[in-house]
Amino acid sequence: MSHQICIRSAVVDDVETIYQLLKPFVKNSITLQRDRDNIFQHLQEFLVAEYDGALAGVVCAHIYGKNLAEVRSLVVDPDCQNHGVGRLLVEGCEHWLADMGVSKVFALTYVTDFFIKLGYRTVSKESLPHKIWTVCVHCSRFADCDEVAVEKQLFDTLSNP
């Protein structure tokens, strides 16, 4: 049986479902807590995946500047994992960011192999700019972070995207 997967920009009617999708991953300390107000405030940064018509995944792309953005809050409903939903969400972010002129993207992750398969490479967290840590200081693991930093060059900064 073939499944229909659609990646699209999030809309206000998605906020509650996004919140519910993130909740178990927050509980298991995989992603940072986002309350509904935070999701509303950053809604323009979110893409969602519809799997056979139901919201099954979410990702957020936060832009730090012309040359750097972060893929964050990437989660896929466990019932819809291993069907390419996460890959399509990340690729959707990459296309959106490249179209806006952002040349490099990174993520802090526990699923390094997933990102490596998508063309990312591991980097030291210390190589990332200090401004990315403004969200991290709210994490209970900040002092002893065990996430791995990965990054991907979306295009050469000397050429157009």
Image: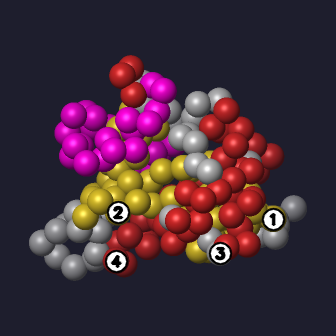
Residue occupying the point 28% across, 35% down:
125
Above-or-below relation of 131 to 61: above
Distance from the alpha carbon under mark 3 to that under mark 2: 19 Å
Which circle's residue, 4 or 1, is located before the other in the chain?
Answer: 1
Query: Of the residues shown, which amino acid type is indicated by label 2?
Result: Ile
The reply to whether dot 4 and dot 2 touch (C-beta < 8 Å) is: yes
Q: Which residue is mark 1?
A: 54
Query: Was residue 87 drawn as part of the magenta stretch in this picture?
Result: no
Viewer-side label of 3, 4 = 3
Q: Residue 29 at x, y = what percent? A: 58, 31
Distance from the alpha carbon under mark 3 to that under mark 1: 14 Å
Distance from the alpha carbon under mark 2 to that under mark 1: 27 Å
Task: Write down the quadrant of residue 160 in the picture.
Answer: bottom left
Q: Which residue is mark 4?
A: 100
Indicate the quadrant containing the C terminus: top left, top right, bottom left or bottom right. bottom left
Q: Which residue is mark 2?
A: 63
Which circle's residue, 3 or 4, is located before the other in the chain?
Answer: 3
Q: Residue 97 at x, y = what percent? A: 38, 70
Query: Of the residues shown, which amino acid type is indicated by label 3?
Result: Val
Which circle's residue, 3 or 1, is located before the other in the chain?
Answer: 3
Q: Residues within 10 Å of mark 4 (few under 14, many from 20)?
A: few
Distance from the alpha carbon under mark 4 to that under mark 2: 10 Å
Query: Of the residues shown, which amino acid type is indicated by label 1?
Result: Ala
Q: Which residue is mark 3?
A: 11
Q: Nearer the viewer, residue 10 or 138?
A: 138
The reply to whether dot 3 and dot 1 touch (C-beta < 8 Å) is: no
Q: Residue 15 at x, y = what percent? A: 68, 64
In the rendered structure, the answer to whether residue 111 lies left or right of residue 147 reads right
Residue occupying the point 51% across, 72% down:
44
Which circle's residue, 2 or 1, is located before the other in the chain?
Answer: 1
